[in-house]
Amino acid sequence: MGDGADAMLGMDTDRCRLQADSLEAAADRLAGLRERVDDSVGAATWHGPDADAFRLRCSLLSQGRLREAGELLDLLARRLRVEAVAQERASAADGHGVASSGRALAPAGAGGRLLAGPSAAASLPLLGAPASAALVSDALGAGVALGTAELTGVVVGLGGDPDGIDRVQDELGHLGGMFEDWAAGGDAPALARLGASTLLLSGAIALAPVETVTDTGLLDPRTDVTVHAVVEVPSSTAPRGLADLVAANDEARRPLAGVPGDADRDGAAAGRVRIQTVRSRDGGEAYIVHAPPTGGAPIWDPDSWGPQGNSAGWDSNLRTMAGQESAAMADIRTAMAAAGVPDGARVMVVGHSQGGLTAAHLAADPGVNRADGAPGSYDITHSFSVGSPVGTVVPAQASTSTVNVSHSSALEPSLLLRHPATWPAPLRIADPVPLLDLAGYRIDGSRVSSPAVREVVLEAPAPALGGASPLENAHESVLRTEHGVDPTGGYHGSLQAGSGTDPVLAALQEDLEGTYVGDGVTVVEDVVVVVGRKDLR
C-alpha cells in the first residue's frame, strides 16, 4: 500500500475464495445438523396429539428457517466468489493489475472501503480478519438463532421444558463468538477449540428434542459445585522434584491411607482436588494445587458425559477445550477457597491429562491469574502437566510458566510396515492425548504460540513390569499394573529418567527449587477437597 494519492487498498482474492469454501462447509454442516435433528425428533418416544403437533412444527422449522439459513450461507459463498472475480477485473481495467498472487488492488478514496464494482458486498469495510468471518456469525445468528427462538415458543406453549433449545442457542453463541472476535481483529479460532465447540453444538441439537420432556444431564453445562468434605492427607512429605509432583497428583485419585471406607467410595459421585500448603526456603508460604484427570464413569458410560457428580467427566474435556467455563475449572476454584488459599497467593498448578488442560485454562483466565491480590485471584507462577493438550492456551500473566510433557514413540515408523513379531518388546508408543490440541493451529493456518508455553517430548519409557498396555504406559501419570506400581513406566518413570537431561525440565526444576520442591521446603498442610456438581444419575 502506498502513501500518496495513488495509495491502494485491496481484497486478497485468494483468501476471499478460501472463506467462500468455509461458508460452503458451514452450509454442509448445518444441513447435517438439520438431518440429525429430524432423526432425533422422529425417534423420540413421545406419542399423542401434542407430540404430533411438536413434530409438525419441528418439521416446518427444519424445512423453513434452518434450510433458509443454509441457503443463505451458500448464497454468501457464491457472492464472495463473484466479488473476487469482479475485484480482479476492476483492478485490471484500472490499470493496476494484480500486485501479488491473489491480491487485486483498487484505488483508495472510499474511506477504507473495497472498490470492486457497484455491489453491496464491495462496500464492506476492511477488517484485520476476513470480512466473511462476520458474515458467518451473522448468517448463523440470523438463521439458526431465529429458528430456535421460534421453537422455544412452541415448546413452552406445549408445556415442555425449553432448556434444551436454550442450550442450542448458548452453544451457537459460543461458536459464533469466535468468528465475531476474528472479524473484529482478534486471532482466528484455534482448530481444536473450533472442533470442540462444534461437537458441543451438535450434541445440544441432537439432545434438544429429548430435553423438552426429560432432563438427561448429558452435556449439561452446570458449573455450580459443592464441597462435600475436606480430608487431611496423613504423613505427607514435601516433593523433591518433578516426578514427585506427578506422584502426588496421582495419589489424590487413590484410596487415602487412614481414611475409613475410602477404598469403597463412588468415584463418579464427586471429584478430588489435592492442595498442599508448603513453607518455602525463604519462610513464605506457597500452594501446590493438583488438578485431577478425567474421572468417574468410563467414556462409554453416558453418565460420564454430564449426569455424574464428578465434574471431571468427559463433557468437561470438551467444554474446557472449547474455551468455555467448565465444572472442572469451578471445582479447582471452589476447592482452593475451601482449603483457605488466600487471594494473591503464590500457586503452582499440577495436572495430568484433563487436569493439565484445566490448569492451563485457569492460568489463562485474567480474573483468576493476576498478581494484584484481587478477590478470587492468585499469582499462578507455574502450570506443570503431563499428557495434556495445552497448545491452544496462553497464560494471562507473561510471568506464568506453562510446561507440558508428552511421550513420543520408541518405535521407528518403518517398523510398523513389518510383521508385528519384529517389533521391540515391550512396544512403546506415543501418547495421543497431547496431540488433541492440533499443535495450536488456527483456522487461518497460523499457530498459537508464546514463550511462556513449552512442550517437552520424552521417549515413552520401558516399563519394568508386565500387565499394562502400551497406551497405558504412554499416557498414565503413574503406571499401575496387576503387579503393583511400575517404577519405570508412565510419566513418573520418564521424568525420573529425563528430568535432569532435558534442558527445559532442568530449568523448571531449578526454578521450583526452594519454593515448591527440594531442600528447605516443608509441608504445612496437605488436604484433599472432595467437591463436585449435583449428581443427576
Image: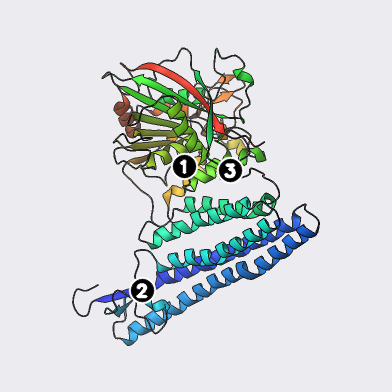
* Label 2 Cα crowd, 10 Å radius (few <14 / some 14-19 / many 20+): many
**Which of the two labelled residues, at mark 3 and mark 2, occupies the earlier sequence position?**
2
**Which of the two labelled residues, at mark 2 and mark 1, occupies the earlier sequence position?**
2
Considering depth in this image, is 330 or 193 the residue closer to the camera? 330
Determine the residue positioned at 36% across, 30% down.
347
Q: CA distance from mark 3 to mark 1?
A: 31 Å
Q: Which residue is mark 2?
A: 11
Determine the residue positioned at 77% across, 52% down.
45
Quarter occupied by the C terminus: top right
Disc on res. 418:
3
Determine the residue positioned at 63% across, 39% down.
307
* Label 3 Cα crowd, 10 Å radius (few <14 / some 14-19 / many 20+): few
Check the image and tell me how it is coloured. Answer: rainbow
Q: Is residue 337 left or right of residue 157?
A: left
- Residue 186's x, y, as percent? 36, 57
Give SS at disc 2: strand
Give SS at disc 1: loop
Q: Is residue 408 left or right of residue 117?
A: right
Relative to 314, does residue 11 appear above or below in the rendering? below
Residue 55, picture quadrant: bottom right
Q: The disc labelled 2 sits on which kind of residue?
A: Met
Of circles 3 and 1, the one toward us is: 1
- Residue 159's x, y, as percent? 70, 54
Give SS at disc 3: loop
Quarter occupied by the N terminus: bottom left
Q: Which residue is mark 1?
A: 389
* Label 1 Cα crowd, 10 Å radius (few <14 / some 14-19 / many 20+): many
Considering depth in this image, is 20 or 375 the residue closer to the camera? 375
Residue 107, picture quadrant: bottom left
